[in-house]
Image (cartoon, rainbow, N blue to C red):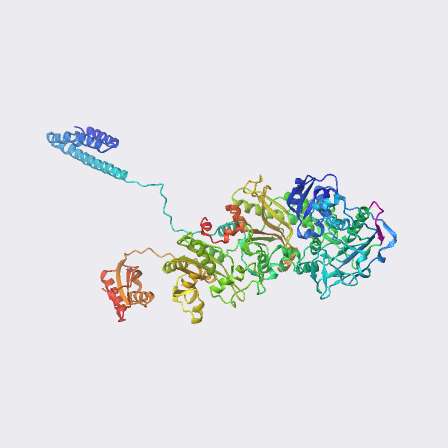
Amino acid sequence: MTKFSLKTLKNQAQKDLNSAKNLKALNEIFKEYLGKKGKLTRILRSLEKMPKAKRIKIGKEANQLKNFLEEKMEQKKSSFVKTTEDKKEWIDITAPGKKPLFGHLHSLNLVKRKVEEIFQAMGFSIIEGPEMETEWYNFDALNIPKDHPARDLWDTFYLKTGFLLRTHTSPGQIRFMEKNNPPLRIIVPGRVFRHEATDASHEINFYQIEGLMVDKKISVANFKAIIQEFLQRFFERPVKIRVRPSYFPFTEPSFEVDVTCLNCGGKGCSACQQTGWMEMMGAGMVHPNVFKNSGLVPKNWQGWAFGMGMDRLAMMKYKINDIRLFYSGDLRFLNQF
Amino acid sequence: MVFSYNWLKDYIKGRLPKPAKLVELLTMNSFEISELKKVDSDFILDIDVLPNRAPDCFSHLGIAREIGAICGLVFKGLTSEIKEDKSLKAKDFVKVEVKNKTACPRYTARVITDVKIESSPKWMRERLKVCGLRSINNVVDIANYVMLETGQPLHAFDGEKLQDSKIIVRFAKAGEKIITLDEEKYDLDKDILVIADAKKPIAIAGIKGGKMPEVDKKTKIIVLEAANFNSKIIRRTSKKIDLKTDASWRFEHGIDPNLTEAAINRAAFLIQKLAHPQAGYPKITQGLIDKYPQKVLAKRIKLELDYVEKLLGVKIPESKIVKILKSLEFKVLSSKFGILTVEVPTFRLDINIPEDLIEEIGRIYGYQKIPAIFPITTLIPPKRNLEIFWEDTTKNILKEVGFSEIYNYSFISEEDAKDFGFKSKDLIELENPISLEQRYLRPSLIPNLLKNIQKNQKHFSEMRIFELGRVFKLPKTEKNILTGLITGQAFFQLKGVVDLLLNKLGISEIWYDQYQPTPEMSKISIWHPQKCAEIKVDHQEIGFLGEIKSGILEDLKIEGKIVVFDIDFEKLSKLASEEHEFRPIPRFPAAVRDIAVLVPREIMMEEVLNKIEGAGGSVIRDIDLFDIYEGEELPAGKKNLAFHIIYQAEDRTLSSGEIDEIQNKIIKTLEKDPEWQVRK
């Protein structure tokens, strides 16, 4: 026997082992190589007839091969045994996963965070203001005089302390401009209140987000760019906006901003009353009186402001049909977010 | 307000756009249209005229003028040539006296004789009907028709029913009463402006006519009134007597005083033309009675063309700007050095400053044509709002440990205030609640959160909820509070949540102090007296943790127990810190020894822990309570506390001898008190 044939034997045995599919085949291989009449057994037996030098050399290699094959076979055997054991085990993978304990953030909070993130990325700071306001900040400073029909646009809860519950986040504009000089870019998110009957689209408290950008020459064109960018990022799809005339005492010119209906993409459907558009926010160029009332010189500054309903954004984003769900405390609703 | 499409055609030269197209054009350039409806051969447009445009656009003429400007069509306006009868003088039929010219800046009257009252022609009845008005008779219908046409409310009196042929505009006297055309009785007072004859009020000025001088079938002489009243007075009166009419609605939005003349002439013209044309025309007596001491003149505004471009963000050629202004009946008096001098027609009460003109230019030019351009501005990094950062962080932590966020109403009812023992001296009361549900602003988030549990308990057996919101207290406190609730006997679970929350907010030095209400407070407290703690950081109390007392849960029909934490969020966010220092992973092994100690029942855990820590010193890495036992096998009044003590040094492997020594020291310290016994 030569070294070469031992090597061939090893290759052959390895090949056989690899192709063995079960315990029975493995036994056959054992017999073939290591059994009483096995190929390797025969070589080992033939050793004693060999010259001493050769005996030592071949003997060493043959024994190594023997150990090697025994080890391989043992590995193979145990893997066959394990496979058989695993086969006996079985789980129903369609059974439900175990729910980890996990809570839920309010959908309006999720919307608020997203709005804040988008505006912060465009350089806007987030400012907050009090929910109890004075007539001055809520109305007079915003160019809404007493005894003026314009005040009827905001149904107001008055408090016995002489304060009122802010009807919009716009007082935030005045409060901020009183203390900060332009150029400025802020958003003011917060809870606002309206004294009106509730239904699927009206609540006595809800959330608004106010936006304000003031500098030397901030224009309507700039407003359109920022708002379009915001809406595209918020709804994560290309949207068109349209700007049409409106009236707010604290902006001049004033406009209403509509966005292409998210439901039908602008073709017209029941959600948008066949118009293809959905009302999104009121906006306009800051009225000179508002600058004046905030202690700024109107002719030095210009800019835009908007007010947008956060509940409405959430309703559009998640297709929620009743604003009252937000304040219902119903976990069957809240736990969906 | 409702408008007739066919009627609008009267004032436009050329062809009006199709109704659907008109809706789109008006929406994009003037006003939103809430409805377009076909009625017989006409279309109804329900136009949401913006409140500042009421003075000129609560009228078919006004809307037609808008359409003319938007579509580039010629607006025709009114034609009313009247023929006065020179043999009859108006002033011989009625004397007008205005007592207060602030309340009534202008009073215009005309007298028409030989009128025959019958029904008005069909076309007029139809137009009124389309606009929602009922036909009465020819004279009243004409007055209404002219109001819908011009925006000027008019009123017709029977000239022969006026006491002493007098019309006096004055404030009512206390005790005066009036019965209106619709047979309603109103008590008047000195703040209510009336039209009176020599004897008594015959109309509530600008709101409703009186029954007495009503035009009826026998009426021969008509006194027509077209007056201008102070908008604030009309608005106040209309609110006070709770009566809104087509007239009051227009007056309270303001009307151009110069409009009365055109309107009254238009009405006289129509009466002459339509009232009884077969048997000789009615006669318009000579002279317009006109009390107008202070004529309102047209305003002038200087408009810089550069500013137009700067504000709109688009360059509109001067010729285009001038054309737009003219189409809206503004006059451009001059154009010098890029500045236009613009005369504003007096019917545009809403136009006072250059920005108002820019709005007119922008909307007629079309906001859609203004391109979207990002602003070029200084880079000022936005300021970080820490309050919001900590709010978000807090909410995230609570969410991660299974809490659902709730937004409740900011109000509580009178009943809740009582049930929860809030005192009215602390509560902010609403002046005008819609219902008793909103009697007060919430002084705490707890009542509404407990109600959430009650409402949800039929669907959920275990609940973890929280809210972060404002609460209110007299005199004018408004602050953010964080409140969390967990169902069941779960004091220690919630305590664990509070610990975790505070740790994650970077707050250490947290401890819990026995809640000790004064006897007076304990009666009204919502907390279980034995299961409530004050949450403290250093020496500052930041909130409470405890079980809600059973009485309150029973009242609210809540099954099982509720544990609540209620934390002043402003204090919390001030204490919170992002600073966090890494602690090296220990290089030397830790050893664990157990210790069990029998102590009197009332001994607090903290005391035991303090003793172990004190005696053990710095090599004690952690002490882990693994069992509290109180039971029959133990001596009465005792409890057994069992701890794992984890020993670990930072600089060496502790030998077992060293640990034994410390452990013995701890045992000795614990047993100093004869009531305490370490179980070996």
| Residue toward you, B622 or B29 | B29
Secondary structure mainly formed by the magenta segment: loop
**Residue A208 included in the magenta stretch of the image:** no
Give the quarter of the image for residue B299. Answer: bottom right
Q: Is residue B178 left or right of residue B401?
A: right
**Residue B281 included in the magenta stretch of the image:** yes
Give the quarter of the image for residue B172. Answer: bottom right
Residue B539 drawn above or below residue B353: below
Residue B319 in sight from this viewpoint: no
Residue B595 in sight from this viewpoint: yes
Residue B60 coordinates in the image, percent (x, y): 72, 47
Give the quarter of the image for residue B553. Answer: bottom left
Residue A296 coordinates in the image, percent (x, y): 63, 58
Q: Is residue A54 left or right of residue B383?
A: left
Q: Is residue A334 left or right of residue B147?
A: left
Residue B288 drawn above or below residue B120: below
Residue A21 drawn above or below residue B408: above
Residue B144 coordinates in the image, percent (x, y): 74, 50
Residue B448 coordinates in the image, percent (x, y): 47, 58
Q: Which residues lie in the magenta part?
A: B277-286
| Residue toward you, B411 or B641 | B411
| Residue toward you, A81 or B384 | A81
| Residue toward you, B668 or B374 | B668
